[in-house]
Image (cartoon, rainbow, N blue to C red):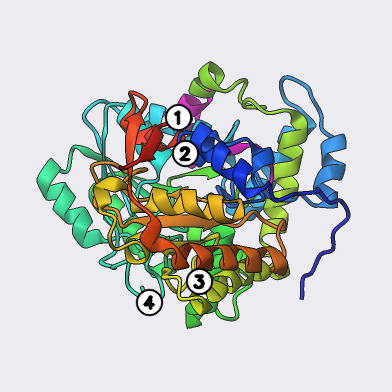
Amino acid sequence: MRSYKAKSVTSIQLPPRERRATALTEAGHNVFNLAADDVFIDLLTDSGTGAMSDDQWADVVRGDEAYAGSRSFKRFREAVADVMGFDRVVPAHQGRGAENVLFGALLDDGDVVLNNTHFDTTRAHVTNQGATAVDCPAETDLTTDSVGTFAGNFSTDRGWDAVEEHGQDAVSTVVLTITNNSAAGQPVSMANIRETAAFAAEIDATFVIDACRFAENAQFIKQRDPEYADTPLSEIAREQLRPADAITMSGKKDALANIGGFTAVRDAALFEQCKQRAILYEGFPTYGGLAGRDLEAMATGLREAVQPPYVAERIEQVATLGALLRERDIPIVTPTGGHAVYIDAAALFPDIPADQFPGQRLVCELYREGGVRTVELGSFAFPETDRPELVRLALPRRTYWREHLEHIAETAARVRDRREEYTGLKIVWEPPMEELRHFSAELEPVA
């Protein structure tokens, strides 16, 4: 039973199949290039696409648009301190803006950054600073039917291997992404957070947590770790961030806002560096590229995100979509993560080789068959890596209902039934920065 009701709705329509086929060709078989009006159910991302609450909309009206020192910034800063335990915070226009601010202050040319698994923009920001991004995921096969309880963990064994390969002095930063988006949205345990923090301290590296889905990760800890079964969710949310020297946050995820982000740090000197860099790239440090109303929406959203009914229903809805897909023999990563279901495209399309992007073919066919827009997170999105051929179905928060989930599952089943008809894809144009090619590259079917 949902703990909220609809007050405002948006009409959506499934475009005719002929229009979907034409739109896909015009988009270069890249669904990022589709017009939103040509999409029926949009699972491209859970970033900024959810529904804000009536309290958030009320706060939008109350936003203080002063350039410096607004009361909206004061309220936002208090929310970050209360919910996440950081007093020094610099707002940014979204998560990648926060990464730019923090990594620009932390990283130098030749540095090495370890992560449980770098996501696309995180890897690109590391590379853009002249540093090297190294993944240290847990020893988990994400193509198996069950990946375990906390499959998003950081492997300190792999971390030590990276230290031996690159040298301790080179490894300046260790990042832990919770939940682990590139590893099928799998959660990270409290024990692993502490172990990774201790590892970073031992090698004298700055420990950063990418906290954009911190509330969802806290819910998994409460569900799966008996030690925290009776601990209030808000306390778990703060405790998991306590070991971090700094955090980055996309407010478009677990701050339940349509735009915004921030970085928060412990160290006063690093804070000053971040503020000066924010002035250059984002705006004055008390607005950070945002309107006061956006700061207000994030402040309220952070507090709503750690309310038990909301986050429990959020995790349950993702699990429901996973169950509907499994009933139709669609191979997915289980147990499902916090924000999305991940389909194993290589298992669904075993005759399409990795260099012909089976995941991107699945993305295209889910759209062609049912107007469902998703995203590939395999060899197309992460070139020169050994990532599994996964397709992410990211559910926007508080947006879709059971009937939408059933349509998604039926669409996937129809694609499954026609899988022998499909060939792979090849890239016909891509941008210079390979790490971000999936946002704009164009493809065509292999003859």
From the image, which quarter does the N terminus lie in? bottom right
Q: Earlier in the sequence, mark 2 or mark 1?
A: 2
Tell me which segment is drawn in magenta. Answer: 256-275
Q: Position of residue 248 (x, y in %)?
A: 50, 42
Type of amino acid under label 4: Ser
> Is residue 203 toward the left or the right of residue 77 in the image?
left
Q: Earlier in the sequence, mark 1 or mark 3?
A: 1
Q: Earlier in the sequence, mark 3 or mark 4?
A: 4
Q: Earlier in the sequence, mark 4 or mark 2?
A: 2
Mark 2 touches mark 3? (CB < 8 Å)? no
Which secondary structure lies at badge 3? helix
Q: Earlier in the sequence, mark 2 or mark 3?
A: 2
Residues at marks 2 and 1, CA–CA distance in whole angstroms = 26 Å
Residues at marks 1 and 3, CA–CA distance in whole angstroms = 29 Å
Identify the residue under disc 2.
Answer: 30
Mark 1 touches mark 3? (CB < 8 Å)? no
Q: From this viewpoint, which residue is outermost toward the left?
A: 165
Type of amino acid under label 2: Asn
Q: Which mark is residue 221?
A: 3
Residues at marks 3 and 4, CA–CA distance in whole angstroms = 18 Å
Q: Position of residue 228 (x, y in %)?
A: 53, 77
Type of amino acid under label 1: Asn
When the figure is inspected, residue 341 is found, relative to residue 361, above or below; the finding is below
